[in-house]
């Protein structure tokens, strides 16, 4: 009886293999579900076909309804049979009647399946870690930008304080001269010169500011250098007045006014 069943199974499998080969030759688009290992092996060895499987939770013995492309899956028939109450002695008899090569193939597929699940879990952990690192990096960029703004603001305040101090010293000098008996006419001339000098400074500063207030022609992909430093990076994003640079593994947002295009001549 077993011999007859084996012969029938052999004929069925080979018929399916032949049918599968013919469909591939005809370039037919089909979805074939099977428990036969030989068909899975053939699909894996043919460039015009691809294996796929449904992820399966071996502990709960339930499908996860997630499709894995690129590798075959196990049927988990015996495991499910045990879970639904099939007697153990029947399962053992079935195992004995199955060809050892088939069992080895099923074990290999199961092992591959669990490794794929483990890989998926690790990938999710890495994706989460990468996402957290990007958030931290963006927060760090914002902090650096805020610190730079505060430094620039303090620098301008210091420059303004120095100007007022210098102007105050000059006015104080004129008052001292007046107290020492110099005529008011001469003091007025000196004071007028001082005011004109300060006004000319303001005009020069406005002219320089007007020259520097220009449109920058940076674009994504440009290699640029941060002025007054040795840091060189590639532009990955562009805003209205600033650019995001990739410097090694770090990202940094820098104003256009602090960037210089990196060319072969100035490297």
Image: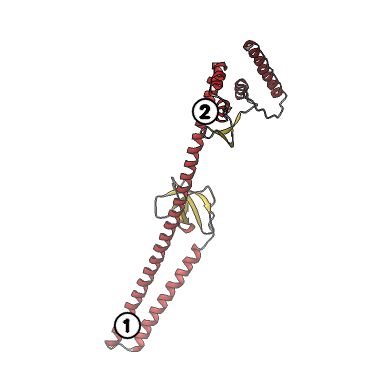
Q: Is residue 1 above or below residue 241?
A: above
Could you tell me residue 75's position as x and y percent?
59, 27
Q: How crowded is mark 2: few (under 14 residues within 10 Å), some or many (20 or more)?
A: some
- Percent across and percent down for residue 108 are 52, 24
Mark 1 to mark 2: distance in Å? Answer: 92 Å
Q: Are marks 1 and 2 in contact (CB under 8 Å)?
A: no
At mark 1, the secondary structure is: helix
Left or right: 157 as drawn, with respect to 85 = left
Which colouring convention does the figure follow?
secondary structure
Q: Mark 2 points at which residue?
A: 112
Q: Which residue is drawn at 67% across and 19% down?
A: 17
Secondary structure, mark 2, is helix
Question: Is 246 positioned to the left or the right of 8 in the image?
Answer: left
- Asked if 194 appears above or below 19 in the picture, the reply is below
Image quadrant containing the N terminus:
top right
The residue drawn where x is 63% and y is 13% is 6
Q: Nearer the viewer, residue 183 or 211?
A: 211
* Residue sitting at x 45%, y 69%: 205
The mark found on residue 174 in the picture is: 1
Viewer-proximal residue among 87 and 142: 87
- N-term mark: 1 or 2: 2
Residue 47 in which image quadrant: top right
Left or right: residue 215 versus residue 46 is: left
Image coordinates for residue 242, horizontal then vertical, percent: 50, 57
Count of numbered circles in the view = 2
Residue 85 percent location from the top left of the image? 56, 29
Front one among 83 and 99: 83
């Amino acid at each position: 009886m077993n011999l007859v069943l084996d012969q029938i199974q052999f004929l069925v499998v080979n018929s399916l293999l032949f049918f599968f080969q013919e469909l591939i030759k005809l370039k037919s688009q089909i979805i074939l579900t099977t428990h036969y290992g030989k068909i899975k092996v053939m699909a894996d060895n043919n460039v015009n076909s691809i294996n796929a499987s449904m992820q399966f939770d071996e502990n709960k013995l339930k499908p996860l309804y997630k499709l894995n492309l690129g590798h075959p899956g196990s049927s988990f028939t015996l495991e499910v049979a045990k879970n639904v109450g099939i007697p153990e002695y029947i399962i053992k008899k079935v195992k004995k009647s199955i060809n050892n090569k088939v069992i080895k193939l099923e074990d290999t597929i199961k092992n591959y399946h669990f490794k794929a699940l483990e890989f998926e879990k690790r990938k999710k952990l890495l994706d989460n870690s990468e996402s957290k690192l990007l958030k931290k990096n963006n927060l760090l960029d914002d902090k650096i930008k805020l610190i730079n703004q505060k430094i620039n603001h303090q620098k301008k305040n210091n420059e303004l304080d120095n100007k007022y101090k210098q102007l105050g010293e000059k006015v104080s000098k004129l008052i001292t001269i007046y107290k020492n008996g110099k005529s008011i006419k001469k003091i007025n001339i000196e004071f007028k010169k001082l005011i004109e000098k300060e006004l000319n400074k303001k005009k020069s500063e406005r002219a320089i500011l007007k020259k520097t207030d220009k449109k920058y022609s940076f674009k994504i992909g440009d290699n640029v250098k941060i002025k007054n430093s040795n840091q060189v990076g590639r532009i990955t994003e562009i805003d209205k007045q600033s650019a995001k640079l990739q410097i090694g593994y770090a990202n940094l947002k820098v104003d256009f006014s602090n960037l210089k295009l990196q060319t072969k001549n100035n490297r």
